[in-house]
Image (cartoon, helix red, strand yellow):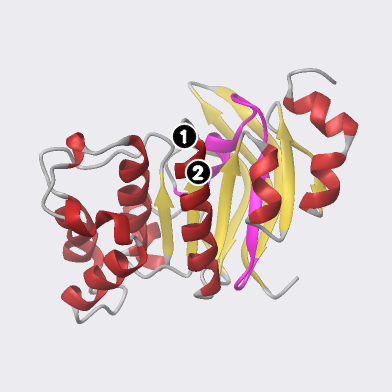
Amino acid sequence: MSDPLLEVSNLTATVAGFEVTHGIDLEVGEGEAVALVGRNGAGKTSTFRSIMGLTPIAGGSIRFDGEELTDLRSELIPKRGIGYQPEGRDLFTGMTVEENFRLPIWTAGDARGIDDEDAVVEDVFDLFTELENRRDAEVQNLSGGQGKMTAIGRALALQPDLLILDEPLEGLAPVVVENLKSYIREIIDRDISVLVAESNASHVPEIVDRMYVIERGEIVDSGDPDDLVQDEEIQLLMQGGGT
């Protein structure tokens, strides 16, 4: 693995006073693509929200590019270079696709050293070519796949060093899934590190270099995606069996 860009160590997070993750350890290297795989409710979203400062942390450490993030306010974390596509997209309804791309630049572009807003927005449209003819559409009128692309594009608009994608392929038709996989690979080819959550482990080997498996808020395995998706115990776990 390359030098760690993101280092999560012994992370414990809480929701409504209850622990939802327990001693999470994971790393993402510079230019690396990593998956966090687990069935629904295993702790993927809680882990990601902890990294983004949106879920309270009861213990452990989150370091990004050598800086400790655990005490940083959530609105400052994107300014440090982490882009985030939430599981539910959370697009700004009543605004167009293009306005969703521009809003992060308006609020945090100076911190990211962005001095040509138009060039950044056009670069996002150059990646997601399917959105070009939807740039003036209000986001509540998009298809599921277009909404996912818009959410990812919004996260890319701040030109992050690390892009965190929470279930980008969930609930989409197979042809849309394949299109989004190719877009994610293109993002990775731009030397942006990627951390992606997936409930369907079969998608992972085409996208990432390494994989972690999470169950009941704990990392239970990690390694090569091709090997792990063939492991019978992991398959059973993903289907809701195992221990």
Please give the residue where the numbered disc 2 appears in the rendered image.
Answer: 177
Q: Residue at x 44, y 37 (%)?
A: 87
Image quadrant containing the C terminus: top right
Q: For the magenta stretch, what is the residue range?
A: 29-52
- Rendered location of residue 27, percent (x, y): 68, 59
Image quadrant containing the N terminus: bottom right
Q: Residue at x 73, y 50 (%)?
A: 211
Q: Is residue 52 left or right of residue 241?
A: left
Looking at the image, which is closer to me, 222 or 175? 175
Q: Residue at x 36, y 66 (%)?
A: 127
Q: Is residue 170 above or below residue 2?
A: above
* Label pair 2/1, CB-CB below 8 angstroms: yes
Q: Say how many tags the image has.
A: 2
Looking at the image, which is closer to me, 18 or 49? 49
Looking at the image, which is closer to me, 239 or 195? 239
- Rendered location of residue 24, percent (x, y): 70, 43
- Rendered location of residue 175, percent (x, y): 48, 42
> Mark 2 falls on what kind of element?
helix
Instruction: Report crowding for label 2: few under 14, some 14 to 19, many 20 or more residues within 10 A (C-alpha).
Output: some
What is the spatial separation of the Cα atoms under label 2 and label 1, in whole angstroms? 6 Å
Q: Is residue 16 above or below residue 124?
A: above
Please give the residue where the numbered disc 1 appears in the rendered image.
Answer: 173
Q: Amino acid at mark 2?
A: Val
Residue extending furthest front?
175
Q: Is residue 8 visible?
A: no
> Mark 1 falls on what kind of element?
loop
User: Does the magenta portion include 1?
Assistant: no
Q: Amino acid at mark 1?
A: Ala
Q: Is residue 240 left or right of residue 50?
A: right
Q: Which mark is residue 224?
A: none
Instruction: Report crowding for label 1: few under 14, some 14 to 19, many 20 or more residues within 10 A (C-alpha).
Output: few
Q: Is residue 15 visible?
A: yes
